Amino acid sequence: MKYVIVGGSAAAISAVEAIRSVDSTSQIDLFSDEKTPLFSRVLLPYYVAKELSKPMLNFRSADYFDEYGITPHIGVRVESIDTASKTVAADNGETYAYDKLLLATGGRAIVPKIPGVDKEGISPLKTMADAERVLNMKGKKAVVIGAGSIGVEASISLLRRGIQVTLMEQLGQVLPTVFDEEGASIIQKVVEDMGVEVITGERALEFKGNGHVSAVATRDREIDCDMVLLAVGVRPDIALAQQAAIEIGSMGGIKTDENMKTSDPDIYAAGDVCETYDIAKTSHFINGIWPMAVEEGQVAGLNMVGQRAVFPGSIRMNSIGNFIGFPAMSMGATHPDECSYVEEDCHFEEIKHRTKNTYKKIILKNDCIVGAIFVGQTQKSGLITTLLRKQVNVSGFIPTLMSPNLNFLDLLPVLRQHGDVFTEPEFKEIMDTGL
Amino acid sequence: MQVIKVDPEKCTGCHQCELWCGSEIASVTKELPQSMNEEPQPVPRVFVEGKRFAMQCRHCEEAPCLAACPNGTMRKDPETGLIYVHEPTCVACWMCVMVCPFGIITPSPVFKVAIKCDRCRNMGYPICAEVCPTNAIYIEERQDYRSKKF
């Protein structure tokens, strides 16, 4: 069997490990168009802040490809797929045959078509090349366009290097896809107290300057700067899939079934490039986050090697961790509007608990958790995530779930009610104690 | 793999397992009286929370924390199947905390790492099982009920 993997990050490596767990001898060719292999994109803000050196960004060791018997093609881009002859053509002039192919090409940073965007001193932060460019910029005043997870973390990274930062978001709050208004307002205050100037509700209309950027113009003002970071989002890198006439879903990602297979029976997709069924939203979505990429890659790999594996559906989840010295996490839907209405008698509940510096919110749809936000206090949040992913009815347990003393044993009755869903041995071992 | 099990009929909720985990494993001085006064305070990896039961990391078969860790800090020992935090590379992103179904990973802003039971990987026997005064904590071979045929 010949396996070809297009991509070299979370989903690709996870798939390779799944294949190797069953098949230790077949040929695996892995293509990554990034010149630096095996680095974690999640940690680029730490690299840009000069808090981690490049080797510390790796999520696998340098001898990984040898150890797993993979033929790596680093810095090589696959340009086209011929699904009839089952070959791929790479930009090194060679073609490679495959029996099973994985598309794990991830996403491309969106470069907005704003006049002046091709001036010097302006960069996104997605690839290692972007990170090196930003690291080498000699600016003293930066504007970060987009206050999503990347924008917020990048602002703090630059601040830590002694650069003055203005964070600009066109919507009315920071982190609009991660937190609701209340959670976002707490984070915004933390970030402002650290020294970042935050502007919401304004769009960058032009990048001014003579060759090198010198100011960002909005409708109401001009902000002087000498560097700009673009953090306005990513789009799935579907060029290869489109060229091979593989079906693309309604959200713009490669359409996959529950085995991570595409419309071509020998081609699979995983990670930020594909669409999966979102459990909270009950519709297909691109949940481009590391844990989902790893799980999708594993399911894809197992199916590629002939084992039946099913991906149970994805959810969005984000964790700011300790990066800004103030923990905050959210999973699933941040607002009932994000979920589709499946039946007529769908009902939503939002339960919130707010103190001066903490905020906790759980969103229920028909008594199942579809979303949760934890700001300031994130211990044991995994319990809520698990109940969300299993989609079990938690009515009667709301006070328990909202309690600051929530612990696993309090949820044993829920597990017992849904023993058919909590089948893993680690759950059974606790359920069997009779507690 | 060998897993820790707890018998709630024998557990008295005495917290000995927590104390010993805190002083033997987590502390610097490794002595109980001194470790209670250490700064920063050592963090035990086993939890006795208001019930007659001790909860440690379950070392899940398909551990979600392993998939969530973005830089290879959360690792699985290939010989024992035990999941452990390789603390030198932990960047305190706490994605593992966000996915743990048992809530047994402690996000520590003080130590700047995720703290989790590794079932005393580098010792002969888990300390909680060793010190339990009623032998409520014991080790057994895991049975995966999903593969049982009836």
Image (cartoon, rainbow, N blue to C red):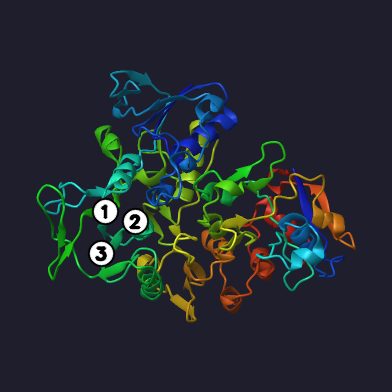
Q: Name the residue under label 1.
A: A229
Three-letter amino acid code at disc 3?
A: Met
- Rendering quarter of residue A403: bottom right
Label 3 vs label 2, nearer the camera: 2
- Residue A193's place in the image compared with A251, above or below, is below
Front-most of residues B111 and A339: B111
Residue at 37% in and 38% down: A262
Dot 3: within a 10 Å radius of its alpha carbon, few (fewer than 14), some, or many (20 or more) residues?
many
| SS of the residue under disc 1 | strand
Measured as percent of width and height from the top left, residue A321 is found at 49, 60
Report the Cα–Cα distance between label 1 and label 2.
10 Å
Report the Cα–Cα distance between label 1 and label 3.
10 Å
- Which is nearer the N-term, disc 1 or disc 3? 3
Report the Cα–Cα distance between label 3 and label 2.
14 Å
In the rendered image, is residue A432 in sight? no
| SS of the residue under disc 2 | helix
Identify the subunit bearing mark 2: A
Three-letter amino acid code at disc 1?
A: Leu
Q: Mark 3 points at which residue?
A: A168
Residue at 31% in and 48% down: A125
Measured as percent of width and height from the top left, residue A410 is found at 67, 71
- Which is nearer the N-term, disc 1 or disc 2? 2
Q: Mark 2 points at which residue?
A: A158
Query: In the image, is A308 to the left or to the right of A159?
Result: right
